[in-house]
Amino acid sequence: QSALTQPRSVSGSPGQSVTISCTGTSSDVGGYNYVSWYQQHPGKAPKLMIYRVSERPSGVPDRFSGSKSGNAASLTISGLQAEDEADYYCCSYAGRYTLVFGGGTKLTVL
Amino acid sequence: DVQLVESGGGLVQPGGSLRLSCAASGFSFSDSEMNWVRQAPGKGPEWISYINDNGRPTYYADSVKGRFTVSRDNAKNSLYLQMNNLRVEDTAVYYCARDFTGWSLDWGQGTLVSVSA
């Protein structure tokens, strides 16, 4: 499968909100409610932030929210904080026990 | 807490082999579906393999099919990835990842595999 499409970078000031988009196809994002989002700081492993489109694991601040419409999903981070600066990756189930990831978005907190 | 600790990475020549291991703790490994995901330097993650909780079925990305084999030993709480006929493009950090729920992942810290002459 082809990778999901994400913007290469987004930025925002502390306290603001940013939204990261993730575009796929009807064979992945549009076909299943199994979209997840991961945060990755430099040199670290990815950390699960959102699962099943909009669910948050325990311990993830409610500033992080997810949604989906058609073949596109999005991650919104409200009340930006300095520690939110990281790379963010979306991921979708793509059928037949396979997963597809996005290319990643670098979030800069100005 | 969920802990996934990968080992076995290193430098290998093209055409060589490596076997990665992942030691799991903090959850019921024998009831968990597991995956291997890799991330090349500066790139996004790439899913490469899935294994069901009892070892069957297994699935692979086209990029590694026929060269990589995933297996598990539930008695040892361990996951494995046998990698044969390695190519330069297989250079990446390899992560062991538990299916948290709904095809989302909890990740280990990763092990670096470098394929170079």
Image: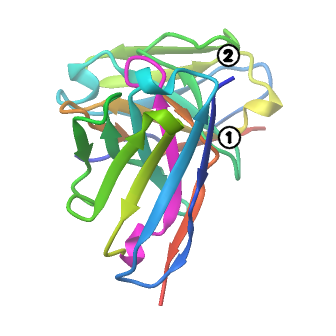
Which amino acid type corresponds to the residue marked 2 in the rendered image? Val
Give the x, y percent position of residue A60.
67, 16
Residue A43 in the image: above or below residue A25: below
Q: Seen in the image, is A98 located left or right of residue B77? A: left
Residue ranking furthest to the bottom? B117
Q: Residue at point 24% right, 43% down?
A: B59
Q: Chain of mark 1?
A: A
Q: Nearer the viewer, residue A98 or A2?
A: A98
Residue A75 in the image: above or below residue A3: above
Q: Seen in the image, is A54 located left or right of residue A65? A: left
Give the image quarter of residue A82. Answer: top right
Residue position marked by numbered label 1 in the rendering: A86
Q: Residue at point 20% right, 21% down?
A: A31
Q: Residue at point 24% right, 22% down?
A: A30
Give the x, y percent position of residue B42.
55, 60
Q: Nearer the viewer, residue A32 or B62?
A: B62
Give the x, y percent position of residue B79.
46, 44
Mark 2 crowdedness (10 Å alpha carbons): few <14, some 14-19, many ≥20: some
Give the image quarter of residue B14. Answer: bottom left
Which amino acid type corresponds to the residue marked 1 in the rendered image? Ala
**Mark linked to residue A60:** 2
Q: Residue at point 36% right, 74% down?
A: B86
Magenta-drawn segment? B87-104
On-image quarter of the N terminus of chain B: top right
Using the rendered image, report if marks 2 and 1 lie on a common chain. Answer: yes
